[in-house]
Image (cartoon, rainbow, N blue to C red):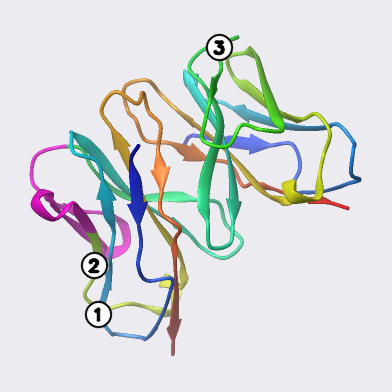
């Protein structure tokens, strides 16, 4: 079974803090993705990566950055957290040929 | 840019009722289509997918979906829902040339009552 894990299930941070969300997958997948999930808005793609050290902007990259130093790990960084970044953050991975994305359990972030 | 519409935001059904959740997408080229489900407190998981071939696809737990290209639709169906089907359902589309990028609909919350 594919396993995608995220470092925290719940996180509370203060406005202006730098926040790191970590995601690890154990299936040697090439592709990794970060989404945010908000009620009534569904999932929106923040950033994705096709390979180590590669990254592409998704639909809502503003206020975020990412890092992929190792194939299995994809980090989402909030440089200076703001209250409008309070959300559920989902990580996903997929292999280049299978196309199906596998999701982690999510990190619910509250920015005060 | 591609987009996905799920017109039913919240659906309430009694057990054993039939289910159909609508999904329409806007993209003129080749697409791959997905339905994902998120049960309460659980992570998002794949319900079924369509890449090519038979437009009627069957997924887990008795769900099926039909791809109608002329209507740009990929509706999800189940003949008889169970209380355990209570969840949020997301339709998603991946268009050719977008390199595995998924565009999700806003989701439909299904509540099944006993």
Q: Secondary structure at mark 3?
A: loop
Question: Residue at label 2?
Answer: B77
Mark 1 crowd level (few <14, some 14–19, many ≥20, 10 Å Cα): few
The reply to whether discs 1 and 2 touch (Cβ–Cβ < 8 Å) is yes
Which quarter of the figure is the N terminus of chain B placed in? top left
Residue located 27% across and 50% down the image: B25
* B89 lies left or right of B72: right
Q: Is residue B94 magenta?
A: no
State left or right for residue A6 relative to residue A97.
right
The secondary element bearing badge 1 is classed as loop
Q: Residues within 10 Å of mark 3 (few under 14, many from 20)?
A: few
Q: What residue is shown at x 80% (from left), y 29% (from top)? A: A79
Residue A63 occupies quadrant: top right
Magenta range: B52-74
Instruction: Decide which of tag 1 and tag 2 comes sooner along the chain.
Output: 1
- The percent position of residue A14, horizontal first and vertical second, equals 91, 45
* Residue neighbourhood size for the residue with mark 2, other residues' Cα within 10 Å, grouped as few (<14), some (14–19), many (≥20): some
Residue denoted by label 1: B18
Residue A82: x and y in percent read 81, 44
Tag 2, which chain?
B
Residue A26 image point, x, y percent: 56, 26
């Amino acid at each position: 079974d594919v396993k995608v894990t995220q470092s925290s299930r719940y996180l509370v941070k203060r406005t202006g803090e730098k926040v790191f969300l970590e995601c690890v997958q154990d299936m040697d997948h090439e592709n990794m993705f970060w989404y945010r999930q908000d009620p009534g808005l569904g999932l929106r793609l923040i950033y994705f990566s096709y390979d180590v050290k590669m990254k592409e902007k998704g639909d809502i990259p503003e206020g975020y950055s990412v890092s992929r130093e190792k194939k299995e790990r994809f980090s989402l960084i909030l440089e200076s957290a703001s209250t409008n970044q309070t959300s559920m953050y989902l990580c996903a991975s997929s292999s280049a040929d299978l196309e199906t994305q596998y999701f982690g359990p999510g990190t619910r972030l509250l920015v005060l | 840019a591609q987009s996905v519409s799920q017109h039913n935001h919240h659906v309430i059904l009694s057990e054993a009722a039939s289910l159909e959740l609508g999904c329409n997408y806007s993209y003129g080229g080749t697409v791959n289509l997905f339905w994902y489900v998120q049960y309460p407190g659980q992570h998002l998981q794949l319900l079924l997918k369509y890449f090519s071939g038979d437009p009627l696809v069957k997924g887990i737990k008795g769900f099926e979906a039909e791809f109608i290209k002329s209507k740009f639709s990929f509706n999800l169906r189940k003949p008889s829902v169970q209380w355990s089907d209570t969840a949020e359902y997301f339709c998603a589309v991946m268009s050719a040339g977008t390199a595995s990028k998924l565009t999700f609909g806003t989701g439909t919350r299904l509540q099944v009552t006993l």
